[in-house]
Amino acid sequence: MTPSKPLEAGLVRELGAIARPGALLMDPAECWSYGYDNSRRQAMPQAVVLVEAADQVVPLVQLCNRERLPLVARGRGTGTTGATVPDRGGLVLSFERMERILRIDPDNRLAIVEPGVTNQALQTALAPHGFFWPPDPTSAATCTLGGNLACNAAGPRAVKYGTPRENTLGLTAVTGAGELMRAGVRTTKGVVGYDLTRLIIGSEGTLALITQATLKLTPLAEARRTLRASYADIHAAAAAVSAIMAQPVTPCALEFMDGSAIAMARHVGDLGLPPGTGALLMIEVDGPAHGIDQAAAAVAQAAGVPGLLDLSTAARAEEVAALWRTRAALSPALRQIAPKKINEDVVVPVSRLGTFIEGVDRLGREHTIRIVNFGHAGNGNIHVNLLVNPDDPEEMARADACLDAVFSLVIALEGTLSGEHGVGLAKRDHIHRELDPVVLRLMHGIKQQFDPNGILNPGKTLPPQD
């Protein structure tokens, strides 16, 4: 699909008839702020519609389908892969005003929401009922549930509670042909037909636009214990991760920082770590109050592999805050050193975590790129941060070569190129390394069925067909 032509007056009138007053943006100064995401990519849409109700979405998609007008849906733009950047012009459909929690049903452990609800707003509303929705991205305060579903964005709690795919019962969505569809169930079991709910989740708005979601809720735990374990090197930490995940108590968070990340965090303040700390695990255990101490003890015992330097346990809120201070110190330190760093998320088998980090360190030295690694160790989900200056062409050339080699290492270790950030534009041209030609052909066929004219988020997620 080529970039679309300037919108004709008749089309603008039709868009205006669908949009609420003041909800059709045409001024470039207003449209510009809807052309970005957290990947730092930006492009100018031809128009923006701020939808306020689901009944506006069907006619908007039908209009775009008729005119072959690219249509990119977005929430708050917190994604990191360029998935909501309108790089081919067209229309941006913003769900930010569809922010109603339609139903909270504690008896059936579900909530029905619109896509513009923020993750944190939902958690706040659920807490008085004694429930939460497990996906908890770092950007929870601002990211929308529609965006969480579009990218299958998870966060630390996925190690125990799963991703949005495991915590969503059903969806209402509009296909690229402008057809309203309802997929899934409102029960915790159901196997009628193909699972289109899980297919649409993670498809980055390329198959259908989610207008409503039925989410599966989980009871809040009665108690929580937090542990921080320091290790001599990443191999000791990786051995601890394997040991922790092999025993019956699954932690609700199992985060790690490598030696470079620890060094960065030390720029911010005293972390209270023993000398020689080369890797760090932050571990949380939750569950019934009567068994929480035994659960924490079991995890602590598993963490006690050779190379452990120190293990601290906290129960009181102020102690927990002190232990998490290390992790909280990292992001400010990275922003100070490289405000425009490249942040990629990849996943390798947990048993190969040490091998991967060691390989990334080697690649950083070979390409003279400073790399900091941290992430969700229990899933093998590593955030690889290349501390580069995008305004330096020579450094960016080295960074591109380094990142290419990192992706090759991931595939060699039987991993996957994205754990929770998605594909978008950033990784689109690399996924052929992971997906074989038959799978890619089938995926293009699915795209054709949902979006016959290719208007939904064109050019994202899948590479062009040969």
Image (cartoon, rainbow, N blue to C red):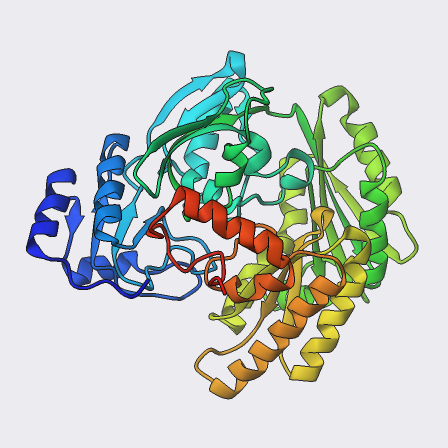
Answer whether residue 231 is visible to the viewer in this image: yes
**Considering only vertical position in the picture, is 285 above or below 457?**
above
Judge by depth and name the residue closer to the eye, 322 or 445: 445
Judge by depth and name the residue closer to the eye, 114 or 414: 414
Q: Position of residue 362 (x, y in %)?
A: 74, 76
Q: Residue at x 62, y 52 (%)?
A: 325
Judge by depth and name the residue closer to the eye, 228 or 200: 200
Q: Position of residue 446 (x, y in %)?
A: 48, 45
Q: Residue at x 84, y 50 (%)?
A: 240
Q: Is residue 206 left or right of residue 428?
A: left
Answer whether residue 207 is visible to the viewer in this image: no
Judge by depth and name the residue closer to the eye, 214 or 337: 214
Q: Residue at x 60, y 19 (%)?
A: 189
Q: Is residue 388 left or right of residue 257?
A: left
**Considering only vertical position in the picture, is 69 above or below 359?**
above
**Considering only vertical position in the picture, is 405 above or below 81?**
below
Seen from this angle, which residue lies furthest bottom? 394
Q: Position of residue 439 (x, y in %)?
A: 60, 52
Q: Residue at x 65, y 83 (%)?
A: 367
Q: Is residue 406 left or right of residue 440?
A: right
Quadrant where the N terminus is found in the figure:
bottom left
Q: How many marks?
A: 0
Classify residue 347 by image quadrant.
Answer: bottom right
Q: Is residue 252 left or right of residue 133?
A: right
Seen from this angle, which residue lies furthest right? 306
Q: Position of residue 391 (x, y in %)?
A: 43, 81
